[in-house]
Amino acid sequence: MEDLFIANYNNVDITVTEGDLQEGKEIKLLKKLKRFNLGSGHEKIETSKIDEDEYVFTGITYFGGPVQRMYFKRIK
């Protein structure tokens, strides 16, 4: 069973698996995050591992625009 990670964005929680946070799965993750109205056209999206218990998802809708960032923490 995969570990679960939780993020809070605009006071709403979302839980995903560690597999959802792996590099190369950003489009799949973005689809799971659609309820947050992050938009569909991004110049850049990436997920980075901070440490064993935390990941960060970063989305840039257009260069020079606001950065969308969600921090996912392991549920213990």
Image (spheres, rainbow, N blue to C red):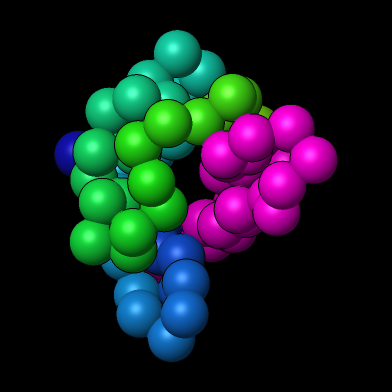
Position of 20 compared to 41: left or right? left
Position of 40 compared to 44: left or right? left
Residue 13 in the image: state x and y as whole percent: 35, 75
Q: Is residue 50 visible?
A: yes
Image quadrant holding the C terminus, namely bottom left
In the rendered structure, does residue 38 fall within the stretch colored magenta? no
Q: Which residues are magenta?
A: 49-76
Q: Point out the residue furthest to the top here.
A: 24
For the stretch drawn in magenta, the main secondary structure is: strand
Q: Nearer the viewer, residue 47 or 36?
A: 36
Position of 56 compared to 50: left or right? left
Going 33% across and 59% down the picture, which residue do you hit? Answer: 37
Residue 57 in the image: state x and y as whole percent: 56, 43
Q: Nearer the viewer, residue 48 or 53?
A: 48
* Residue 60 vertical position relative to residue 35 in the rendered view, above or below: above
* Residue 58 vertical position relative to residue 54 in the rendered view, above or below: above
In the rendered structure, does residue 73 fall within the stretch colored magenta? yes
Residue 55 in the image: state x and y as whole percent: 60, 45
Q: Nearer the viewer, residue 54 or 40?
A: 40
